[in-house]
Structure formats: C-alpha cells, structure tokens
Image (tube, rainbow, N blue to C red):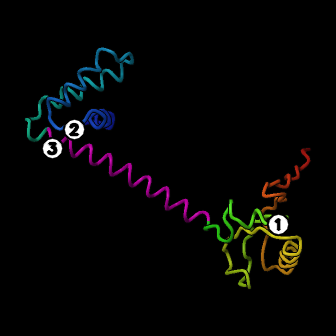
Amino acid sequence: MKFSKSELDIIYQYAAPTKAETLAGMKEIVPVIKDLLTKAIVENAIRKLEKIPEPECSQFVAATKARFLAERDNSIRQRLAAAKLQEPIMQGHDLSGKERFHPETRHMITLEVQKDCFVGFKGERFRFYLSDEGYRNAKHSEQEGEIKIKSHAAVVAGKLYPDKKRRQQER
C-alpha cells in the first residue's frame, strides 16, 4: 500500500506502540481539524492503516517513526558539519577569559592568519585581549601581511566597546 509524504508525516506524529493506539490518536483529531485538505489526508491515512493487519501495521508505524527520526538526526548532523566546515574554530582567549579583566588590557581583536607565522598557520582564527603595546605589534603584523584583523573592540575594565562599522555612502 502506498502512503503519501503528508500521510507518513501524520503517522509519524501519532505513532504509538500498537495499531489501535495509533488509530485512536488519529481519529481523535479528525473532528477538530478545520482545514479540509489536512482532514482528508488524516482520513486517508486512517483508512489505509485500517486495511493493514495488526502485526504488520505496528511494524510499519514503528519503521515510519524510526525513519523520520533518523532523517531528522541526519539533518541536524549535516547542518552541524556544514557549519563547522564554513567557519574555522576560534582559538586564543575565551570571550569571557580572565585576560579581558587585566588592568593593562585595552583592546580585543579577532584575526585571521594570512601566512604561516609566529601566531599560527594560514587560515586559523584567533581572539586576543591586548595591551596598547600588543595592539601596536598586531597592527605591525597586519602591515607585514602576516595577519588580517577582522574586528576590534576597545576594552575598559573588562567591558567591550566594539568599533562602529563605517557606512558606505549610498548614491
């Protein structure tokens, strides 16, 4: 017997250990469904399930639920893997690290290494809390082409004040 994607969605949502429990859950919602298309989908799914004998029906419902859960879990894993590939891991100081609260800390920068150097390897990303002297060194490394400073924030007593982005004039 063939089930549509919409019917399988309904079966997954109301899946229970037995055929009777699954059908009871589905039949319970039919009177309150206002959308005619949804009501027709639920009624068709009920009719099709009623035609399947008990042991096979329970197995079919369980398999449908397992397939939906596996698809959902794979989708989440795939999205997490894609996110990891898109953006390299941030290394260096933690956002709320103790370095942020040192009295001499005046700058927070995030940077990307442009070529292998003392900071790290090409493509790596770092966050650092720096004194004025450390920030001057970072600017010098940027001029040398070793790093690219992606963002900067002033730090006062541990509080961050990000630089405002310059707006391009619209024509």
The residue carrying pointer 1 sits among few (fewer than 14), some (14 to 19) or many (20 or more) residues within 10 Å by Cα, namely many
**Residue designated by label 3:** 59
| Real-space Cα separation, disc 2 to disc 3, in angstroms | 15 Å
| Real-space Cα separation, disc 1 to disc 2, in angstroms | 67 Å
- Residue at the (70%, 65%) spot, across then down: 98
Residue 64 in which image quadrant: top left
| Element carrying mark 3 | helix
Between disc 2 and disc 3, the foreground one is 3
**Circles 1, 2 touching at the beta carbon (< 8 Å):** no
- Residue at the (42%, 52%) spot, across then down: 75
**Residue designated by label 2:** 2
Where are the magenta residues, as a range? 58-87
**Residue designated by label 1:** 105
Q: Nearer the viewer, residue 110 or 73?
A: 110
Please tell me which of labels 1 and 2 falls first in the chain: 2
Q: Is residue 4 magenta?
A: no
